């Protein structure tokens, strides 16, 4: 049972680190997106760029049955990060 407890503790620590990394990535992407948008003369430049690249070829193929609607949820999440005006939302 001790081995199981140690493994659960290690997994909890890993999940905590992944959560921190995810949040740090979101903040960094939002800051960079905001900076690039401010420097661009074209509003929504990052979103337009993403949509243009995405329409020319799929970035990733999603065919796993447990990932139903995953591609659309991923797209919405990416667009939210690229067009988010501030960090409070």
Image (tube, helix red, strand yellow):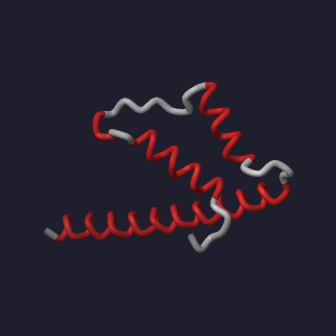
Q: Residue at x 66, y 69 (%)?
A: 86
Give 59 or 86, whichever is nearer the viewer. 86
Vertical order, 78 against 61 (above or below) = below
6 lies left or right of 16? left
2 lies left or right of 58? left
Q: Residue 37: percent from the left, percent from the top?
A: 77, 56
Q: Residue at x 59, y 74 (%)?
A: 88
47 lies left or right of 42? left
Q: Residue at x 41, y 69 (%)?
A: 16
Q: Residue at x 27, y 64 (%)?
A: 7
Give 41 or 73, whichever is nearer the viewer. 41
Q: Residue 33: percent from the left, percent from the top?
A: 71, 57
Q: Residue 26: percent from the left, percent from the top?
A: 58, 61
| Residue at the extreme left | 1
Q: Residue 76: percent from the left, percent from the top?
A: 51, 48
- Where, quadrant-wise, is the C terminus in this rendering? bottom right
Give 20 or 74, whichever is nearer the viewer. 74
């Amino acid at each position: 049972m001790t081995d199981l407890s140690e493994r659960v503790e290690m997994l909890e620590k890993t999940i905590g680190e992944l959560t921190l990394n995810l949040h740090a990535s979101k903040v960094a992407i939002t800051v960079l997106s905001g900076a690039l948008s401010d420097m661009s003369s074209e509003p929504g430049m990052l979103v337009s760029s993403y949509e243009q690249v995405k329409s020319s070829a799929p970035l990733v193929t999603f065919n796993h049955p447990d990932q139903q609607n995953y591609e659309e949820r991923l797209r919405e999440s990416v667009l939210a990060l690229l067009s988010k005006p501030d960090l409070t939302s």
